[in-house]
Image (cartoon, rainbow, N blue to C red):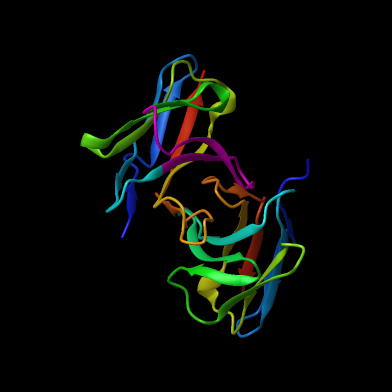
Amino acid sequence: AQSVTQLGSHVSVSEGALVLLRCNYSSSVPPYLFWYVQYPNQGLQLLLKYTTGATLVKGINGFEAEFKKSETSFHLTKPSAHMSDAAEYFCAVSEGPFNTGTASKLTFGTGTRLQVTL
Amino acid sequence: DAGVTQSPTHLIKTRGQQVTLRCSPKSGHDTVSWYQQALGQGPQFIFQYYEEEERQRGNFPDRFSGHQFPNYSSELNVNALLLGDSALYLCASSTRDTPEQYFGPGTRLTVT
């Protein structure tokens, strides 16, 4: 079974400061890893994904994440926070393609609410 | 390019009733997955439909059922509603051989 742990249910940073949201996963097979963002009363928007290859992946809005197999981590970072980054962030893991070739189910963490202050 | 759409946006039902939620996938996508997101929690996988068949299922009771139509749209049905079924129901679409799923805005179900 897969699982995701997001350390820190709430993170507060000043505008312009580094954003670091932590994600650790558990998987019995090589994982596919994702970060999604959810704004109030909206669905989830894909920020970035890791499947294979380069372990540092870049996403939208200046976010990036690094897959570290030895640490079973996939932390999300952004060099400089903006007020518009305030939202809920979810890390998710899947097992790679299902036997039908379709995307495997996603297992999500409980989320981290990012607050950005002036 | 139309994204994933869901209807209705909000729904209020009484315990014991039945509800049907609808989802149209992103253009070009043929796979639909459904997730339940309780307040303050991450989404939980309910099931996935591909080629009009349920392909994967999460840990949800048989009260939760679904359907996929030839145009790839999908319905989620919940029978005998319980108070605990109150949640945001998210539909996600994807296409074969790509790992990412794209989510719709969700349907907020309140059971009273």
Residue A17 lies, with reference to residue A65, above or below; the image says above
- Counting from the top left corner in percent of width and height, residue B58 is at 45, 68
Query: Which of the pair B29/A89 is nearer the observer?
Result: B29
Q: Which quarter of the rendering shows the C terminus of chain B?
A: bottom right
Residue B8 lies, with reference to residue A50, above or below; the image says below
Residue A53 located within the stretch drawn in magenta: yes
Residue A2 located within the stretch drawn in magenta: no
Q: Relative to residue A114, is residue B23 drawn left or right?
A: right
- Counting from the top left corner in percent of width and height, residue B48 is at 56, 64
Q: Residue at the spot x=66%, y=81% of the render?
A: B18
Counting labels gives: 0
Query: Which of the pair B58/A32 is nearer the observer?
Result: A32
Q: Residue at the spot x=36%, y=46% of the render?
A: A31
- Quadrant in the rendering for residue B14: bottom right
Q: Relative to residue A33, is residue B85 drawn left or right?
A: right
Residue range in magenta is A33-55
Q: Residue at the spot x=64%, y=67% of the render?
A: B51
- Counting from the top left corner in percent of width and height, residue A44 is at 58, 45
Residue at the limit of the structure toward the left, as seen here? A70
Residue A39 lies, with reference to residue B84, above or below; the image says above
Q: Which quarter of the rendering shows the N terminus of chain B?
A: top right
Query: Which of the pair A12/B67 is nearer the observer?
Result: B67
